[in-house]
Image (tube, helix red, strand yellow):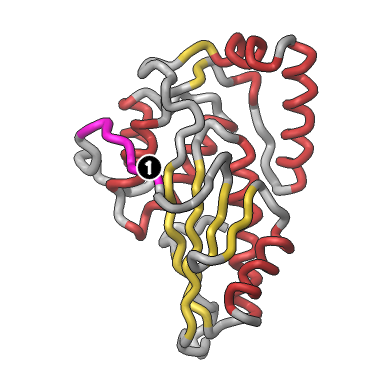
Amino acid sequence: MDLSDSVVEPAGAQAAVATRSLTVEVFFDFVCPWCLIGKRQFDAAARRLAELRPDVHLQVVWRSHALLPNTPAGGVPYQAFYVARLGSPEAVARRRAQVQQAGTAAGVRFAFDRIEVLPNTARAHAWVARTGKALQAKLIDRIFTAYLLEGEDIGDGAVLERLALECGVQADVCSTDEERPEGAGYPVSGVPFFVFDGSLALPGAATSDMVLDVMLRALGA
């Protein structure tokens, strides 16, 4: 499920009018495969919440949190970066197998071998920040899949413009490379990181069951 309007509404013409709201802030970065896994699990939890609590209006706020903000604007060689970071090709293979296993459980098949450039994600986050709420989640999902499943260079302005147009975002929405400011007041040390109504936090790519449980706790259910 793509939360393309950042709001989950109950299905059906006779659905109950929402009487309770729940705001979830999602901190993420596009270079992190766990963030795509986390988004898929969050989407599944949101579907279940809509079924269980049709009285709830779910509002999702997407917040950038760059993991590697000092990456050069043109990016760096992807494969070499991770070999240097993890110490050996064998260590990289083990880490990717772990991520791939988690991705498969969430319905995601990563294509790490297709990625050539580790990008600076400032431009990608800028596109999201300047896109209207109705299309934000759709664009986020498309950028994630373009990078992690198709191997595209999402640090390239032309690539981002094409992806945005595919999602119905106007080409002149983002005229600069300014990055969206990170959310303040939360001890975010890694992503994905979810904050529910400003009170409960859930770090990491939790299962949909865990996400749903925190949602219900935030609602006092």
| Principal secondary structure, stretch drawn in magenta | loop
For the N terminus, give its image quadrant: bottom right
Q: Quadrant of residue 54?
A: bottom right
Percent position of residue 201, x then y: 59, 58
Percent position of residue 21, x then y: 47, 77
> Looking at the image, is 132 positioned above or below residue 175?
below
- Residue 171 as seen in the image, left or right of residue 196: left
For the C terminus, give its image quadrant: bottom right
Per the image, is 178 magenta? yes
> Looking at the image, is 83 positioned above or below residue 199?
above
Residue pictured at 64% horizontal, 24% vertical: 112
Residue of label 1: 166
> Looking at the image, is 168 positioned above or below residue 15?
above
Percent position of residue 43, x then y: 59, 59
Percent position of residue 142, x then y: 47, 42
Q: Nearer the viewer, residue 141 or 49?
A: 49
Which kind of residue does numbered mark 1 sit on? Glu
Residue pictured at 33% horizontal, 42% vertical: 180
Disc 1: CA contacts within 10 A as few (<14), some (14-19) or many (>=20): few
- Count of numbered circles on the image: 1
Residue pictured at 64% horizontal, 74% vertical: 216
- Residue 204 as seen in the image, left or right of residue 135: right
- Residue 53 as seen in the image, left or right of residue 21: right
Per the image, is 5 magenta? no
Q: Nearer the viewer, residue 85 or 107?
A: 85
Give the residues drawn in magenta, as a range.
176-182
> Looking at the image, is 162 positioned above or below residue 212?
above
Residue pictured at 43% horizontal, 16% vertical: 75
